[in-house]
Amino acid sequence: MRPMRMILVGPPGAGKGTQAARLIETYKIPHISSGDMLRAAVKEGTELGIAADGFMKAGRLVPDDVVIGMILERVAKPDAAKGFMLDGFPRTQPQAQALDDAMTRAGFDLDAVVLLEVPDQLLEERAVGRRTDPVTGKIYHLKYNPPPAEIADRLQHRKDDTIEAVTTRVQKYHSETAPIVPFYMAKGILKRVDGVGDPDEVTKRITSVLNS
Ligand code: AP5
């Protein structure tokens, strides 16, 4: 399979993490999630994590200079040399430009930017009902993808999955992240995918646009 350098874009709760977990099996590339990296930094209490924590809890974006450095360092690691799946980055115009500049310097092109489209009215329910298994990293949903009863006690609910924080995150998506879409459309690599429906069906739609 040829190297694949791709980005998953979409509002909070669109299913980026759910789909990334499936797609990296197919494409054999590392999943680089800015949200997961920031949550790990918060948990470890690093300087970066302490700086990011308040922004994340409130559903606001972490400042560009913090996130850009973190991600450019990660994509420069050897395991990303033959491709990667970025999830949650870029999500502002300066982040998109910084990634573009770094790719140009490295002599690589992005292959695809998959935009998962889900109407706002479904996002709150998806995020508030999400539960994550800290042992396996698997993402569940109390209604749409119920976890097995035997792991119910260890499941975690994200601090930013409150109705208030999700509302702010959706607003930030429209004001800060949606404006990067024309940038990738102009490059001819934007793939719009309907993110509503069974997750297996959504995976099929994504692989179909990536293979076309
Ligand atoms: P991040 O972790 O990136 O969160 P997000 O973009 O808000 O996305 P989510 O993780 O909420 O949703 P998802 O699309 O992955 O959906 P999932 O698959 O889990 O960022 C968190 C925070 O970190 C930001 O708010 C910001 O503060 C900071 N941050 C991160 N990156 C940053 C950056 N680049 N710059 C600045 N700040 C940054 O699915 C959601 C739920 O729906 C699950 O329960 C799942 O089971 C369910 N589900 C999934 N697919 C379906 C389906 N097809 N049908 C029904 N249910 C489904």
Image (spheres, rainbow, N blue to C red):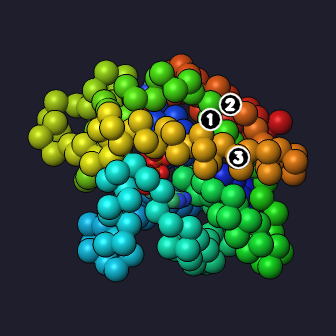
Coordinates of residue 77 in the picture (x, y in percent): 59, 78
**Which one is nearer the viewer's eye here, 176 or 26?**
176
The crowding category of the residue bearing disc 3, from other C-alpha atoms within 10 Å (few below 14, some 14 to 19, many at least 20), is some
| Amino acid at pointer 2 | Val
Q: Is residue 165 left or right of residue 25?
A: left
Residues tagged 1 and 2 counted as in contact (Cβ below 8 A):
yes
Instruction: Determine whether the beta carbon of the residue marked 1 sits less than 8 angstroms from the nearest atom of ligand 1.
Output: yes
Which-is-in-front pick, marks 3 and 2?
3
Disc 3/disc 1 C-alpha distance (Å) = 15 Å
**Could you tell which of marks 3 and 1 lies nearer the N-terminus?**
1
In the image, residue 161 above or below residue 96: above
Circle 2 sits in a helix, a strand or a loop, which is it?
strand
- What residue is drawn where x is 38% and y is 59%? 55
| Amino acid at pointer 1 | Leu
Coordinates of residue 184 in the picture (x, y in percent): 79, 49
| Amino acid at pointer 3 | Pro
Quickly name the residue at label 2.
Answer: 193
The crowding category of the residue bearing disc 1, from other C-alpha atoms within 10 Å (few below 14, some 14 to 19, many at least 20), is many
The crowding category of the residue bearing disc 2, from other C-alpha atoms within 10 Å (few below 14, some 14 to 19, many at least 20), is some
Q: Quadrant of residue 46?
A: bottom left
Query: Looking at the image, can residue 74 be seen?
Result: no
Q: Quadrant of residue 155?
A: top left
Residue 116's label in the rendered image is: 1
Residue 132's label in the rendered image is: none
